[in-house]
Every structure is written in structure tokens, then in C-alpha cells.
Amino acid sequence: MSRSAFRSLSRAMFLGFVRDRTALFFTLLFPVLFLLLFGSLYKTSSAPRVSVLEVGRVSLLDQAESASPAQLGKVLAITHTADLQTALADVRQGDYDAAVQQTGRTLVVHYSIADQTTAGIVQTVFTSIVQQADAAAAGSKGAYQLTTAQVEDKSLKPIQYLAPGLLGWAIASGGAFGAAITLVNWRENKLLRRLRLAPVSVGTVVLARVGVAVAVALAELVVFLAIATTPYFGLRLTSYWWMAVPIVICGTLAFMAIGLLVGAFARTQQAATAVANLIILPMAFLGGAFIPLDYAPAWIKDVSYAMPLRYLVTGMQDVMARGDGPASALPAIGILLGLAALLTALSVRVFRWDAV
Amino acid sequence: MSATISVRNLRKSYGAKVAVDGVSFEVEPGEFVGILGPNGAGKTTTLEMLEGLRKPDGGELTVLGLPPWPRNTALLPRIGVQLQASSFFERLTAREQIRTFASLYHVPANRADDMLGMVGLDEQADVKAEKLSGGQAQRLSIACALVHDPELVFMDEPTGALDPQARRNLWDLLRKINADGRTVVLTTHHMDEAETLCDRVAIMDHGRLLELGPPAALVRGLDTPTRVSIQSGLLDAAAAGQLAASADGLHAGSARDTGGTDLGVSDDGVSLTFATREPAVILAELASRNALAGLRVQGATLEDVFLQLTGREYRA
């Protein structure tokens, strides 16, 4: 392989990319716009705080509040009132989610089943308060802390699964569309043929294109993380987030291989775009990029195992947001690399230099 | 020194369609050869096999003494191929394009810049390829084909969609390339182009080589009448008929309004035209009668040769 040829080809392709404002916008900023859209969408619908009217004095509630005000504050917003009748009217009208009173050792929770989710949360929260009070009375301390710790780890805040999901989708589309369109365009304008007539190896050309694509994908990663970790979005990266770098590289290879295969069959740029869309868009929904797999219906979870995007997304989620160790990314990396190898081998077989 | 290109009984089919059907010819070093033919005649396929882009189905083929198929990296630096004027990297300037191609051949950047100057694109060096005019883009693609100083240059319809000025301008460039000692092979639709540029032309149709020779020799071999025209009305019809008959030894009666390429005389109301094999006799007679106003003398052209060989029928 010639180094000067590799360098100049890489440079040519890189300049071609950064001078394309549209491509630059779609690659670097479009995913962020999606983050903005999805982020605000999920923000309003998830983890609602329950507003509770404390009628008179409810010692159990006060006790729980003073024990860990921050924890309770996350789930309950407590307002004090004296009048039960107005409190019940408020709950009925939906101004508050529940009204609580305590008579002796009995805790009475009034709630409306108009909103079943909130009703469920109200029941769960108060059941656990009562249980903790019982446990405290029995002298076994610390159960409360243990329960919340688990709650914190298992359920990711929306941004924690949205960010890796959207990033994965962006990397996947960038790789697939980039490879497919480059191949089709170069075949159409005969640049492919021109390169074939130069004493440069196919490997050099491919490697230069892959190198540029990987560089672009890593730039996407940096821009995306820089924006997602701002306080507005509030993505919190866990310790091994940098393992996302090899995952992104392998994901780029895998999706470029998909694009290569699309480009080998498609005759025009329009056809290539359409086919790549047909592959990537459903995969974004079925592979956990747009819909977090934790909350997806069972059939989507099953189907997701067949989606290459799943491994890119969950691989990144594990190391970026769930705090898993570097080794947890290895299966995903292996699957993506295997796919890349398989599809590249297939593309080489069906590759055409010319349209005819 | 052996021939630069040697082709013997070259064949190529696409499925049932025979594109090249047993073509043989040789091109000597330093020659400028044109391949002419209607659409689908097999010229592009022939060129592509010479360039090593397609595998011949049969026959023998060497270029600079080497077989071009399979892709021969020993041969590639010695040949230059000019493709369409759009075969460029996206959004790169003229200078960046040619430097990129130069690096593929290990040619230094300053040589690439010189080549840009040679095709007259110094001022457009920083213009993106997409923004160049048709002629400029064509020059750039030729510069990119020549950047590694190849011994043999192939061009596929280099002046395809250019205006007359740009074409003539490009002809000068092509002559210069050939004058530098390079062998040039081009395909074209334009007879005037082949006639003015080529040492020899090959006329192809239906995958076969119909004629190969210097344009002038082909035209002379055609044996068509010369057409001598003067203004209508200088000579009355009877006198014209008599003159035509006596010059070419025809019966006066058969010399009228024959039209076409046959001998005789015709008058379309604007011009009186003699189709004759004895233009000297006709011209002397017309001069003695002082009837030379609006004189035009037209010999056969390469186009006549071409049409005679390939027919006048329109092919889509």
C-alpha cells in the first residue's frame, strides 16, 4: 500500500465531506436535534412526581421525610392542609394526586384512579413507607436505603438511554448512507473507473474511505457527548464511557459494510438512499435506538437480537450509562466486527466497477 | 520497436449481443488514431478492452507489449485514460483534483500544477470542479489523464458536448499532446475532428472494423463526384445541362436534376450545382462564361466515407 496515495485520498475524501454543508449538518447536528426532540418528549412523560395533601398531622410521613428528605422529595411533593373535605375535592378534580390522613396507627390514603399510573405510584410509595415504619419498629434498620439504591441503578433516566440510542442511530446511518452513496456516485461519475486505471490498490482506496468515515463517526461521538452532557440534557457518563470509542469504530465498520452491499446493488443515488433508509429506519425502532428496549414490548425485544443496531446501542449504553466494565462491550464489538467481515466479503462478491 | 497497440481478432459479447466481432489493427508509436462509428458500433468496448477495463472474450491484445487484462499495475502508469469530464472527487478544486491524481502515480505536486498550466487552467486552480465550464472541466480531466506523463493516451469522445470555440481550443491541446511524442487513441462522433487531428482513422460498425487509413486516403478512395456550385440564374438550364454532359461525357438528357451524389446538374433556386468528376473542365468553362459568382467547390469529406460505409439510416 502506498502511503502518499493513502494520505492524499484520505485528504480528498475528508475535504469533500467537510465542504458538504448538508452532509455536515445531517451528520453532526441532526442527531442532536433528535436528542432535543426526544429528550423533551420523554422528560414530560416519565417519572412523574406525586403531589400529596397531608391532612392534619401524619407522623409516618413526617418521619420518612426527616429520615431522607432528598429521596422522598423525588417522588412526593407534600402540601399541608387541615380540611379533609376540600382535600378530597382537590383530589377528585385532579389538582392533587392523593390526600393522606393518619388516625392513630392507621394510615388512610385517598386517591383517584382517573390516572392509573399515578394511582399505582401512590399505592407503592405509601405501602413502602408503612413497611419501613414497621421494619424500623421491629428494629431492623437500613432496609430503606437498600431498596432505593436498587431503584436508582436499574431505571435509567431517559437521557441515559436516549443518548446512546440516538448516537448509535447516527453512527449507523452515517456509515451506511456514506458508504452506499459514495460507491454509487463514484460508479456513476466513473471516478471508480478512474481509480481502477491508476496504479493504486483497491485496499488503499477502501482504507482511506473507511478511515475518513471512522474519523467522522468519532467527531460525531465527541460533538454529541459534548452537547448531551451539558446541564440542559444532563447525560451523566459512567466510568468506562471511553469504551464507546472502540464500539463506535466497530459499529461504523459494520454499517459501512451494510452500505457497501446496498451500493453494490443500487444503480442510482436515489435508489441507494431509499434502500438504506428502508434498512436503517425500522432498525432504529426495533434495535432500541428510538425506543428503549427496557420498556419495549416483548416482541420488539425478541426481534432486536436480529438487529445489528441493537449491539451498537446496548454496547454503548452499558459502558456509557449503566456503569458496566470495559469487558461488557466485548460481545457487542465481536458481533459488529463479525458482521462487518461477513458483509464485506459478500459485497466483494457482488461488487461492480461499472454500471453495465 | 514493436507496435504500441497490437490487436488481433478481438472479440467481446454482452450476452447475446456481439459488441466487438473480430477486430484487428496495430497502432505505431507516436501515432494519432481515431476510432469512428455510429452509436453501438463497438468503439467504446474496444477502447475499454485496450485500457484493461474489460476482459476480451477472444483474440490477442497487447498494449505497450503487455496484456492489459487482468488489471496490470505495470502497464497502468504508462497509459493515460481520459474519462467523462465529471469523473472527479466531489467538492475539490481543480488543483486539489490534479494533485490527488498525481499522488496516485507518485508524481510531485509541482508537476501537477505545471500540468494545470499546460491545459490553461492556472486561473481556475482554486475553482471547484463542479463550478468549471464544460470546456474547462474537459481540460481538467485531460490534465488528470496526463499528469503522470503516459506514453499512450486514450480519450473517449473528448469534445463531446463542447461549443465550437472550446472544441478548437481543445484540438490545439490534443495536437500538442501528440506532438510531444505521445501516442493518442480517441473515439469521436465528429468527422471534422477525426479529419483534422488523426494520422489514421478506423471506421467501425456492428463490432467490425470497416476501414483503417489516413483520412485523406479514405476520402480519395471513395471516388465521389466533386460538387461545383454557383449562383442560380447565371446559366440557363439548357446550357448547364450541356456543360455537365460534355464534361463528364453524359447524354444531355440524363444530366438533369439527378441530385444526390450521382453525376449531373441540379438547381434548387438558390444554387446551381454540378456533380462532376471533371471539376477542372467545369470550372474553366464557367470562368470563360464569367459565371463564377457565389462559387463553391466541395470535395468528398470523411463524413461521406463514413456514411457510405455505415449507411444513412438513423439509429437511436
Image: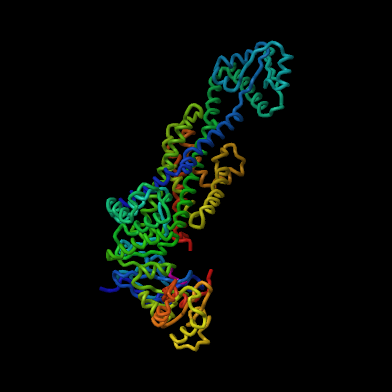
Q: Residue furthest left?
A: B1
In magenta stretch: residue B224: no
How many marks do you count on the picture?
0
What secondary structure predominates along the stretch shown in magenta?
helix
Q: Is residue A63 above or below residue B159?
A: above
Task: Report x, y in % for residue B316.
Answer: 53, 68
For the magenta stretch, what is the residue range? B41-45
Question: On the picture, is A167 further left or further right than A52?
Answer: left
* Residue beneath the point at 46% across and 77% down: B309
The N terminus of chain A - image quarter: bottom left
* Residue beneath the point at 55% across and 28% down: A151
Task: Report x, y in % for residue A234.
Answer: 50, 28
Question: On the picture, is A137 further left or further right than B118?
Answer: right
Task: Report x, y in % for residue B315.
Answer: 53, 71
Question: On the picture, is B286 further left or further right than A6?
Answer: right
In which quadrant of the rendered view does residue B32 lie? Answer: bottom left
| Front one among B198 and A311 | B198
Q: Is residue B221 above or below residue A229?
A: below
* Residue beneath the point at 39% across and 53% down: A206
Q: Examine the rendering and report whether any part of residue A293 can be seen.
A: no
| Front one among A163 and A243 | A163
Q: Is residue A334 above or below residue B44?
A: above
| Front one among B281 and A28 | B281
Q: What colour scheme has been applied to the protein in the rendered image?
A: rainbow
In which quadrant of the rendered view does residue A54 lie? Answer: top right
